[in-house]
Image (cartoon, helix red, strand yellow):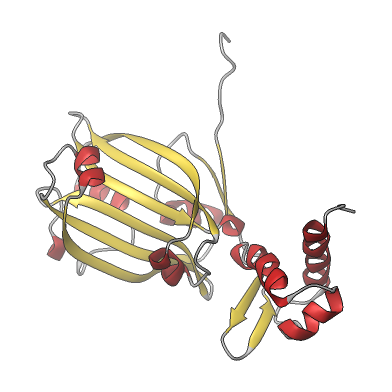
Amino acid sequence: MPHFPFQRLQADLAALIAKSPPGFRLPSEPDLAADLGVSRATLREAMRTFETQGLIRRRQGAGTFVVGKPPVIESGLEVLESMLTLARRTGLDVGPGQTSIEQVMADKESAVALGVPEGTSLVRVSRTMRAATRPVAYLVDILPENVLHAGELTTKFSGSVLDYLLQRGDPLVTSRAEITAANASAEVAKMLEIQRGDVLLKLTAILFTASGQAIDFSHSYFLPGYFKFHVVRKVGGV
């Protein structure tokens, strides 16, 4: 049994969730806090972990419900594939949710990533990806207008910019990605229906053509409980 109070609280909550069937409504926050001997603020902080993992779901005015063990998309990162491709291969029903396609001006970060001057007109494609009844990922792609026009995706877009570019025949060869843990901003939290500051998996990537041109700068935010990524590496000198 963990020795620290917060760890004990999380262990008690984990045990309660594990023994409760999907759809079970947990006791109200005041009652549960009293039962566990903690403040409501401490309880709320501990419950955020399980909500981010997809094990519980808070519904405004209705309470907190047990979801059960969520489906997991597990993949290596050695080969770049779209989230839709990964989901299809693992037999999970995942599809695009709310989508926004807009024209934006390049800020310093996107200008450096795409090798264009600041203020250059770019296309920003943002959307959620949903599994069952909730969003599990928030994806943002930023591309030069000479690569993708905002009106180009209105009728042909499946949710994956990568798949669209590949089907169009673009000569894509490499992607450089950084993997970090990130706290959800207000925008990301709203799109993923979580609390601001919740911890997410974040992949920041730049997609290159055969000529070395950067054509897509992306930020992908994943709920940890629904995704498991790994990397297979050779041992040095072998």
In the image, taking residue 42 as reference, residue 212 lies left or right, namely left
Q: Quadrant of the N terminus?
A: bottom right
Q: Which quadrant of the structure image shows residue 84? A: bottom left
Relative to 156, does residue 174 appear above or below in the rendering? above
Residue 68 seen anywhere in this rendered image of the structure: no
> Which one is nearer the viewer's eye here, 238 or 143?
143
How many numbered circles does the render carry?
0
Residue 145 seen anywhere in this rendered image of the structure: yes
In the image, taking residue 189 as reference, residue 231 lies left or right, namely right
Seen as rendered, the residue at the extreme right is: 1
> Which one is nearer the viewer's eye here, 200 or 216?
200
Q: Residue 73 appears at what percent x and percent y?
A: 56, 54
Q: Residue 80 appears at what percent x and percent y?
A: 40, 40
Residue located at (23% from left, 58% from top): 124
Residue located at (37% from left, 58% from top): 139
Q: Which quadrant of the structure image shows residue 52? A: bottom right
In the image, taking residue 31 as reference, residue 104 lies left or right, namely left
Seen as rendered, the residue at the extreme bottom is: 61
In the image, taking residue 170 as reference, residue 47 lies left or right, namely right
Q: Residue 49 appears at what percent x and percent y?
A: 65, 62
Q: Quadrant of the C terminus?
A: top right
Relative to 197, does residue 177 appear above or below in the rendering? above
